[in-house]
Image (tube, rainbow, N blue to C red):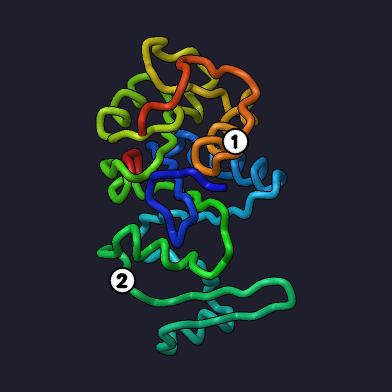
Amino acid sequence: MRRSSGVTQKGCPVVSVIGKKNSGKTWTVETLTSILSKRGVRIGVIKHIHHRGFTLDTPGKDTWKHAQAGAVIVVSVSPEEIGIIRRTETSSFSLEEILQYAEGEDLDLILLEGFHMKTSHRTDVYKIVTAKSEEDLRETIKDTSPPILAVTGIIGRDSPDKELEIPVIDLEAESELLASLVEDVLLGHGHPKGESRGGTKPSNPEQENARD
């Protein structure tokens, strides 16, 4: 059923959404997740957080106290959710090591938010580039290797360079089109619903105010 020729996790296709801070990465991932999950696609999301000292835990809570006491891993189990916090240095992790954390979930697609340094120059990783302006887009595209599926984010509301041979998609008006493009290229059963602005087809394929 899947036809992706890009990097996969145990056969599950991967798409990396990359762009500068406040360019629309989270918006893009959230939109794709919402649309595709409603179409029956099982989605996994992995987000890069570049801030040193960041924790998903809440200071003062029991799980935080356990971690502060020296626990290497803390697992919290509630009636509808399992949370796993593992203390480990991740800066040297490869993309493949990161993707292993999504093993065993029977996923159809994994969306990466950020991870520019780990995916931008990999020709076996499909990307969606988000940008705030044409200048922002030029800088990101220049530092990104194909395959690039589409350009979107804040710039999609405008009319960027018409010579760009990559679909430029308005996430507010054409979100279904972007989802269908991802579904068609990576899962092999999409159904594009029209033409996007600024391009015709995909090419063969964050630090503060910087990429991640």
- For image coordinates 58% across by 84% down, the residue present is 62
Measured from the top left, where is residue 98 in percent x and y? 38, 63
Would residue 135 be found to the left or right of residue 42 on screen?
left
Total numbered badges shown on the rendered structure: 2
Q: In screen coordinates, is 11 left or right of 32? A: left
Q: Is residue 110 left or right of residue 94?
A: right
**Amino acid carrying mark 2 in the image:** Glu
Instruction: Name which residue lies at 67% across and 40% down.
Output: 35
Q: Point out residue 58 in the picture as x, y percentages from the top left corner.
A: 55, 71
Residue 120 location (% of width, % of height): 30, 41
Q: Residue furthest right?
A: 79
Q: Position of residue 172 (x, y in %)?
A: 63, 26
Q: Secondary structure at mark 2?
A: loop
> In the rendered structure, which disc, 2 or 1, sits on the residue that comes first in sequence?
2
Query: Does residue 92 lie above or below 2 as drawn?
Result: below
Residue matched to label 2:
89
The kind of residue on which mark 1 rests is: Ala
Camera-side mark, 2 or 1:
1
List the residue tagged with mark 1.
179
Q: In the depicted view, which residue is nearer to us: 125 or 173?
A: 125
Above or below, comparing residue 49 to residue 85 in the picture: above
Q: Residue furthest front?
A: 1
- The residue closer to the viewer here, 127 or 132, is 127
